[in-house]
Image: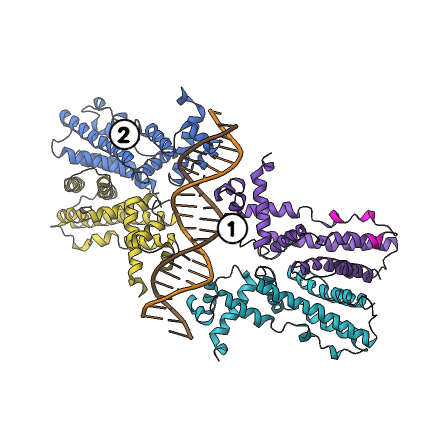
Chain colours: A yellow, B blue, C cyan, D purple, E orange, F brown
DNA sequence: GATGAATGAGTGTTCATTCAT
DNA sequence: AATGAATGAACACTCATTCAT
C-alpha cells in the first residue's frame, strides 16, 4: 500500500518533530524536505499541499485520542473505582520526552491552527468528549454507590480540567507533582 | 514623554486587536500600519523591530497580571474565606468580549511565541506566581482555621489549574458553567 | 503500427480538447494524463516531450487544412462560379461547437505558440496557401469570363481576409450574419 | 503625482515590450524586474499583483483605441468620402515597428488573456465599437448620396473585417500590399 | 515624525522531465 | 506499455527591514 511508503511516513514524522520544535507556522516545507533528505516538490508527490499534510498528521495523531481509549467504564467497580481513576488518569499525563512532543504538537494545533475552523471544531469535540466521558464515569460511580449523587457535572469537569491543565503546565517547564495533584483532585471530588 | 505619544499607543492597541483576531504570526506590520492609518516604516520610528513591539505589548498587557493584583490575602478572614475565594476567582474568568481578546492574546504568547525563551520564562513566572499565590492563601486559611492543614500545595495547585483551564475551554467555544465548577472546586478542596 | 495505438490517439484527443478549453500554456501534462486516465510519465512513452505532442497534434489538425481541400478549382464553371464560391466559402466558417474547438486551438497555435518560429512558419504557409488559392480561383474566373481581369490579387486577398476574420470574430462571441457578409463580399469583389 | 513616477512607468513599458516579445504568460515578474533594473518585490510596491499590472497596461494601451478616435464622421463629405475613408483606414494599419509591438500585445490580450472574462468582454466591446462605427459611417455616406442604401451592415462589416485582418496577417510576417487591398475593399464596397 | 521606494530572504506551489522498475 | 518517485527550475507573492528625504 502506498501509505506504507517509507518516504510518506518519513515526511509525516519529520513534520511532527519540526512542528513540535518550531511550531507549525514556522515550519516550512523546505525544512521538512531537508530533514527527510528530499527536495521540496517531492513532498507534493505525497501530499497535495501543506494543508493536506497537516490534515493527515492531525488525524493520525489524534484519531484515537478519546476518553474511551484510556478509560473502560465497565472496568470500574465499587472496589477499584478511586484507585483505577487515579491510575488511569496518570496515563494521560506526560512522563517521557515522547509525550511532550505529542503535547507540544497538540498545543500547536490548539492555537496556531485553531484559527482554522476545521481544526477548531475537531479539537473542541475532543475536549467535549473528555468532559462527557468523565461525567459518564462519575454516573457509573453513583450507580456503584462510591460517588455522592450531587453536582456530578461540575465534579466531572473539575477532573477533566485538572488532568488537562497539568499537561499544559509541565509543557511550560513548570515542575508539578502530578501524581499528588491528581490524587488529591480525585479524592476531593469523590469526597 | 515619547511613550505618551498618541501614535505609539495607537500602534500597540492596533497590534493587540489584530493579534487577538488573527494571531501573532499572521499579523504583519503592514496590517498594523494600515489599521493605525500610517505607513509601515513609521512603526520603526516607534519600535526598533516587530520583536520590540511584541516585548512592549507583552509587558503592558501582563505587567500587573499577578496573583496579588486580584487577591489581597489580608482581606481574607475566617468568616469570608470561602465566599471571597469564590468571588475573587470568578473575576479571573472571562465574561465579556474584552476578556476574551485578552485571553486570546495571552494564549498566542503562550504558544506561538513561547518558542522564544524570553517569553517562555516570563510566562512561566506568571503561572508560578499564581501557583505560589494560591498556596500562600491556603496557608492563611490554615492560620484562620478554615482550611485543614494537609496537602496544601496539591490543593493550591488544583485551584490554580482549574481557574486557569476554565478560561482555555471557554476560549475554544466550549460552554462551561464556570461559576458552578469554580464553586465546587473551592468547596471540594476546602473540604 | 504504433501510431494506431489507442492510448497514443487518446492522448492527442485529450490534449486537443483541453487546449481548446484552457489554452495550450495552461494545459499541463498532468491534466492530459488525468483526462486520459494514465500517469504523466506514460505520455513520455508516446511522445518525446510536450513539444513533440504539440508538433504531432499540429500536423494532424492542420495537415489537410489547405485551400484545395475545400475548393476544387476545376469544379468552377461560368454558370456556377458565384454560387459555388459562396457555398464553399461558408463551409470554412464555424457552425457547430466542433468547429469552434478547432478554431480555438488554431488560434491558440497562432498566438500562444507562434513565438516559436517552427509553427509561425507553418501557419504563415497555411495562410499564404489560402491567399494564393483565392488568387488562382479568381484567375480561373477571369478565364471563364465571370471575373473582370483587374486587381486580381487585391480581390483575392479581400476574400481570404474576410472569410478568415469572420471566424475570429465569432470566436470572440460577436454575432455576425456570416452568410450575409460572405455573400456581399463575393458579390462586391466579383463586381 | 505618483503615476508620474519614473519606476512606475518604467515597469509598464518594460512589461509592454516583453509581452510583445515573449507573450504575456511567458513574461514573468522576474523578467520585468530585471529589465527595469530593480528587484521583483519592488514591482509590488507599484502594482498590487501581476494582474493589476495587466489591467493598468490594458487600459493605458487600449483606453482610446476607439473608432471615433480615428474617424471623425462629421469630417466626411460627398466630395472626400471615398478618399478620406481610404486614408483614415490606412492609419489603422501598422507601418512602423512601433505599431507591430502594439498589435502583438493587442493579440496577446486577445488570446492568452481572453480566457479571462474581464478582458474578453472589453476586447469584444472594442471590436463591436468598430463594427458599429463603420456602419454609422456608411449611413452617413447614404445621407450624402455616395453610398447605395442597401446591405449597409454587411458592407460595414466587410470594411471592419478587412482592415482588422490585414494587421493580423502582417503580424504573421505575411507581406501584403495593404494600400492596394484596402483601396480595393473601399471601392468594391462603395460600388 | 513619517514617507516613498526598495531589498533579501523566504513561502507554498506548479511544471516538464527523468529514471529505475 | 506504464508507473512510482523524485528533481531542478521557475513562479507569484509576502515579510520584516532599511534608508534617503
Which of the labelled discs sits on residue D28, or is there none? 1
Q: Name the chain letter of the residue that bears numbered label 2.
A: B
Q: Quadrant of residue A4?
A: bottom left
Please state the horizontal and vertical placement of residue D20, each as a whole percent of the image: 60, 52
Q: Are marks 2 and 1 in contact (CB under 8 Å)?
A: no
**Residue farthest toward the top in the current orientation of the protein:** B1
Residue D117 appears in view: yes
* D169 sits left or right of A135 in the view: right
Question: Which residues, given as a range, are shown in magenta?
Answer: D68-83
Pointer 2 residue: B87
Query: Does the magenta-highlighted stretch encompass residue C137?
Result: no
Please state the horizontal and vertical placement of residue A121, each as a whole percent of the image: 36, 48
* Residue drawn at the location 37% of the way across and 31% of the way down: B53
The foreground one among C68 and D149 is C68
Decide: few, some or many residues near mark 2? Use Cα within 10 Å; few <14, some 14-19, many ≥20: few
* D86 sits left or right of E9 in the view: right
The foreground one among A99 and C167 is C167
Q: Quadrant of residue A115?
A: top left
Amino acid at each position: 500500500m502506498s501509505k506504507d511508503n517509507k518516504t510518506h511516513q518519513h515526511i509525516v514524522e519529520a513534520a511532527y518533530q519540526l512542528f513540535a520544535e518550531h511550531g507549525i507556522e514556522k515550519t516550512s516545507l523546505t525544512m521538512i524536505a531537508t530533514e527527510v533528505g528530499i527536495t521540496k516538490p517531492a513532498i507534493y508527490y505525497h501530499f497535495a499541499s501543506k494543508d493536506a499534510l497537516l490534515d493527515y498528521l492531525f488525524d493520525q495523531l489524534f484519531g484515537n485520542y478519546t476518553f474511551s481509549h484510556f478509560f473502560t467504564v465497565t472496568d470500574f467497580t465499587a472496589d477499584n473505582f478511586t484507585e483505577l481513576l487515579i491510575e488511569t488518569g496518570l496515563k494521560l499525563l506526560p512522563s517521557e520526552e515522547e509525550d511532550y512532543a505529542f503535547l507540544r504538537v497538540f498545543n500547536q494545533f490548539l492555537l496556531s491552527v485553531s484559527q482554522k475552523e476545521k481544526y477548531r471544531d475537531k479539537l473542541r469535540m475532543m475536549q467535549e468528549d473528555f468532559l462527557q466521558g468523565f461525567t459518564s464515569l462519575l454516573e457509573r460511580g453513583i450507580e456503584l454507590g462510591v460517588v455522592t449523587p450531587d453536582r456530578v457535572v461540575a465534579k466531572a469537569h473539575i477532573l477533566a480540567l485538572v488532568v488537562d491543565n497539568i499537561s499544559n503546565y509541565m509543557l511550560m517547564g513548570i515542575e508539578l507533582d502530578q501524581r499528588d495533584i491528581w490524587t488529591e483532585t480525585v479524592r476531593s471530588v469523590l469526597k
